Image: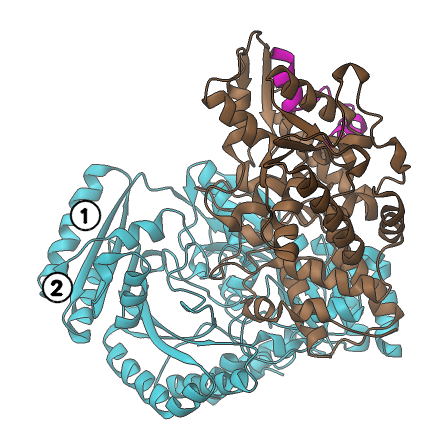
Chain colours: A brown, B cyan
Amino acid sequence: MEVKWKNLEKYKTDIYRCIRCGYCRDQFRFRDNVTSVCPLRVTGAHTFESFEARGKIEIASAVLEGILPINEDTGKRLAEIFYMCSTCRNCWDKCYVKDHIDHVGVFEAFRADLFSMGFGLPQHKKFAEWTKQNHNPYLEPHEKRLDWLPKEFNIKPMESAEIVYFVGCTSSYRQKNIARATVSILKKLGVNFTILGLEEWCCGSPLFRVGAREVAEEQGRHNIEVIEKIGAKSVIFSCAGCYRTFRTDYQEIFGNLKFNLLHITEFLSQLIKEGKVKITKELKMKVTYHDPCHIVRHLAHLGRKAPLIEQPREILKSIPGVEFVEMERNKLNAFCCGAGGGLRAGFTEQSLELASERIREAEKTGCETLVSSCPFCYRNLTDAIKKLNSKMAMYDVTELLDMVL
Amino acid sequence: MSQEAGEIVKKLTSILGEKYVTASLPDLIAYSCDISPEPRVLPDVVVRPKTTEEVAEILKEANKTKKPVVPRGAGTCPAGFIKYQKNAIVVDMTRMDEIIDINEKEMTVTVECGVTWGKLYYELRKKGWRVGSYGPGSALSATVGGALSHHSLAYGCAKYGSVSENVTSLEVVLPTGAIINTGSGAYPHAKKAQRYGIGPDLTGLFLGEGGAFGIKTKATMMIHPFPEAVRFLCYEAENLKQLLDATYEVSKTRIPSDILGFNPWLNNALGEAGFKSLLGKDYTLHVVIEAPNDKVADAQAEYVDNAAKKTGVKEVGAEWLKFFYYPRFAEWWPRTSPKGKRWYAWCNKIPIYDYLRTHELIEELFNKYKDECEKYQLEPYDVMYFVVDWNTVDALLLVYAWDDVPGAREVVRKMWREGFERFVAEGGIHYWLGSAVGELVARNWASEYRETLRAIKKVLDPNGILIPGMLLLT
């Protein structure tokens, strides 16, 4: 095994700027309603400081200095430490260092190097290998990618259109309800769009997160090529993870893209503002909203207006009859659902505990409906609802809007 | 792992379970530093107890093999506490973070000592209460236990003194594993509402001793109603002497909760960050007045304002002060430089007018290291002071450094140690009791005082296992 930290080396500046204040692990701020930082610390999954952002940064500096030898024992422990993290990026948000330390950048680089040395988790290795062949991490055959699409929608993939709807693996194979609701809305609104069908490959998000970068880049390169082939001006996403991957990872690796990127909540809230959405029905529901990390904290470094915080709320508030209540931890402070960063596959129990904590928080609002705008959050939160025997009903924001159009 | 470490891991595992005991190298590295410029020090084992009884069992076990034990809060000591971890069992106290009782009738709060000041503030604020002094500069992450071991101070300390002044009672596990309660908590029928009146003040023995006499597991502290009205006053002084005159007169009123004096560099740094009223100012004084209502606040502000202005200082806009005050635990000084370099800090408590001499000492120190600072891209600044207990100021200076510039941290360390030595030699009174300061302080004790404390340590810790070397007591 060759020990190389080629990805981590790129983050040397970030690593050495850490002032070790510990605000990335624990922080309560009354005025800003901050009551915790690291979700895995809150739920008690993290046993030692090594698992928390400051500890991991210290470990990263130690490996760069060569004082932490990598062998079977340390490699396995490092994998446990660096993979038991949902990469929710709250540590970045709460960092007091000027311009913030890119904690998740460091963690993902560390993971990529671990993965190259063979210390990736078996579950992650398995889905990376599968994705290389079948372009999805769910161990599903590629030819079933379009099974979610009802014939009555009458959509032919890869047709020339101004807009591409990028469905994503989770909505294609698991949360098909979200893909259907999205397409239903686009049809009802008369949007000129197409889908990529079998030409759509995994966006690479789970692979980027766990460090299987080569496979991830291969997927990304293909997706860009086919979208450019169609000549679409914009790509719409109902998956927060796919959107973030195009917006941040793709742009970083492949440079500026030739098409616009829009999350569905961005697209729809703009149409609502322009008066182009005719809502004809009422929904009597008391609703709370879960902010996905991918479209909030993971976009926060791109500018004050980049995080998609208000857009989903505007959609919900535009629906007659909906009573909207915030959870205690919301927007940039939202508690992670636990699905992301490879945590769900790698540490299922800990991932589900995060989702359970979030459901308990949603229940405290007195709402009977929890809404999100990410199929992966939806999936983990739904599992937690089942585990807790909660009466909470889970919806994607597209599903609610589709009901009233 | 050595055979000895393996044995101790086995025994500690039988107390705490496998989940909360580690001797794995990556884990130990995460615990190998604090926020000082001191080099990494690896412990042998790290444990995370949940109860007082578990802490007691750990200490009893350590006594059997005379294994060093070092408690750890948030690991935010700026003065090199890390040194004592060598080959030790580090007891990470942060699982003991419950706020046990907010007793509004008795006006006390009882907490486990691994709780952070930030969490304590948050929970008290929800109910309309506060502790007097809010904790150290790193209060958002620092623990109650760590701060009590160092007489920490920062927010609210002009009026309320160090965090130790909050305390009425402690639960302490002695190095032998015995558990005691101090203050009125020592008296089985009494409530933990009073520190004094049941005999000698043993609470004080366990405060500011760097943790050398016992592991604090619970603390009861006085609480105060949260102020309903706040006033902010800010003044510009023509020179340092005038700033100190104004500080003295304002302190003498015994009204403000915070009194801060800023040097030119900080005024300009904050001015450039957007607080225009500080831009280009040499010396400024910042005063916070907390009161139960507007009427009292206005009267007190008028009184303090008159006291300040008779020294000739001129009022300037207090935008920064409002910005600092309202979020609570905002930073008084930038912990990273405008370029993003990280900070290392010194501090030094002295009577108000002695700051003139401290200021000279700081200039001498910076001049001596001028060439090295340039060579290693270090930026040293004389930053500010804040008033403690009306009669004293705590002077803060810092040096910004790129940690990855080879040799830079070593120069910081050299300069930092020399700074502390100069301050102590000239009568500086400290409270950061990590190795760099604690040992200097202890060397300067009168011999009878030292021997008395050593005798106490011997009684409490016959095997010398708890933080060996702290304050040179063993």
Picture coordinates of residue A166, whole percent (x, y): 70, 35
Picture coordinates of residue B291, whole percent (x, y): 27, 43
Rendered residue at 32%/69% (across/down)? B385
Same chain for the residues under marks 1 and 2 in the image: yes
- Look at mark 1 in the image and give the residue it sits on: B300
* Label 1: few (<14), some (14–19) or many (≥20) C-alpha neighbours in 10 Å: some
Relative placement, left or right, of B424 versus A210 is left
Residue A44 vertical position relative to residue A389 in the rendered view, above or below: below
Residue A386 belongs to magenta span: yes
Count of numbered circles on the image: 2
Residue A303 vertical position relative to residue B474 in the rendered view, above or below: above
Residue B36 belongs to magenta span: no
- The kind of residue on which mark 2 rests is Val
Q: Give the residue at the far top of this rendering.
A: A281
- The kind of residue on which mark 1 rests is Gln
Q: Which residues are magenta?
A: A381-404
Relative placement, left or right, of B279 versus A15 is left
By secondary structure, the bulk of the magenta-drawn segment is best described as: helix
**Along the viewing direction, whichever of A285 and A279 lies nearer the viewer:** A279
Secondary structure of residue under mark 2: loop
Rendered residue at 35%/76% (across/down)? B381
Rendered residue at 23%/61% (across/down)? B278
* Label 2: few (<14), some (14–19) or many (≥20) C-alpha neighbours in 10 Å: many
Q: Earlier in the sequence, mark 1 or mark 2?
A: 1
**Residue A28 at least partly seen:** yes
